[in-house]
Image: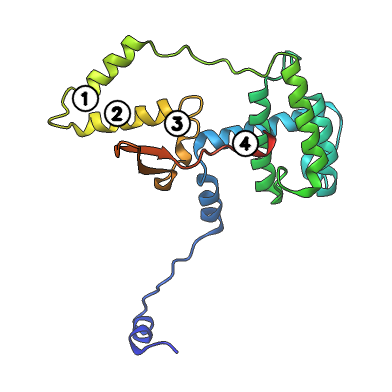
Amino acid sequence: MASASNTASFDLGFSRFKSTSEDKWCKILEDRNCESTNKVAKHMRNILEAYIFEKDLPSFDQTLDAALPALLEHFYTDLRQKNRQMYKLQSLKCILAGLNRFIKEQRGIDIITDSRFHKTNEMFKGMAKVTCKAGLGSTSSFPPIPDEDLECLITYFYQDFEEPNPRKLQQAVIFSLMFHTCRRGRENMHEMKPDTYCVEHDAQNCKFVQLLYFWHYFSCFR
């Protein structure tokens, strides 16, 4: 039973709960992911729809859930770039992640963990091996930062160590995170949380920061 104070607040015309429109719901759902993630999902949808159009298949909206595994099996084997060359392995993984996000949003289906897509995922792994055998499994990385440049950065970050500069401290932390724990620049940085790290002690009882887990979306395809 509501208390007298709560009842009085309603009697005075106050409303505790906000009325949210359907447009606002959609906006919240759209904004829950970072802009780059949404762009990837949209790009993967365009690739899938281009494939469906070229193969003269029913549109994605007309494709039943039961027909999605077979569609993706053929999609993985036929997939090519606009220049008709095969994608690199890392690009294939990005396509898989984008497709999964898109289909999960549209149909509520996780094409990586759903048992109905077991054969589909085996096909993806098979194509990943084909890609590696074709010499497309390696990732083109930027050249390492020269030692002299690293020394300059360290000098810049810590030259005012006695009187810490908040801006430099933030820059030093961001650089250290990206340099030691991020994949491909800052790719997985937005997924890090306070519990991603912990402080431990080594054999000399010196403190060090340890990465507790590494977010790897494709762990099931290792």
73 displayed left or right of 9? right
The residue that label 1 is drawn on is 158
Q: How far, Cα to Cα, is label 2 from label 1?
A: 9 Å
The residue that label 4 is drawn on is 41
Residue 87 drawn above or below residue 106: above
Is tag 2's residue or tag 1's residue first in the polypeptide sequence?
1
The residue that label 3 is drawn on is 181
What SS does tag 1 mark? helix
Q: Is residue 182 visible?
A: yes
155 displayed left or right of 48? left
The residue that label 2 is drawn on is 172
Is tag 4's residue or tag 2's residue first in the polypeptide sequence?
4
Name the outermost residue toward the left.
Answer: 163
Which marked residue is nearer to the observer: mark 4 or mark 2? 2
Give the residue type that dot 3 points to.
Answer: Thr
Which marked residue is nearer to the observer: mark 3 or mark 2? 3
Contact? badges 3 and 2 (CB < 8 Å): no
Q: How far, Cα to Cα, is label 4 from label 1?
A: 41 Å
Q: How far, Cα to Cα, is label 4 from label 2?
A: 32 Å
Q: Residue at x 83, y 40 (%)?
A: 119
Q: Quadrant of residue 9?
A: bottom left
Contact? badges 2 and 1 (CB < 8 Å): yes
Q: Nearer the viewer, residue 214 or 91?
A: 214
Is tag 4's residue or tag 3's residue first in the polypeptide sequence?
4
Contact? badges 4 and 1 (CB < 8 Å): no
Q: Residue at x 77, y 44 (%)?
A: 61
Which marked residue is nearer to the observer: mark 4 or mark 3? 3
Is tag 3's residue or tag 2's residue first in the polypeptide sequence?
2
Q: How far, Cα to Cα, is label 1 from label 3?
A: 21 Å
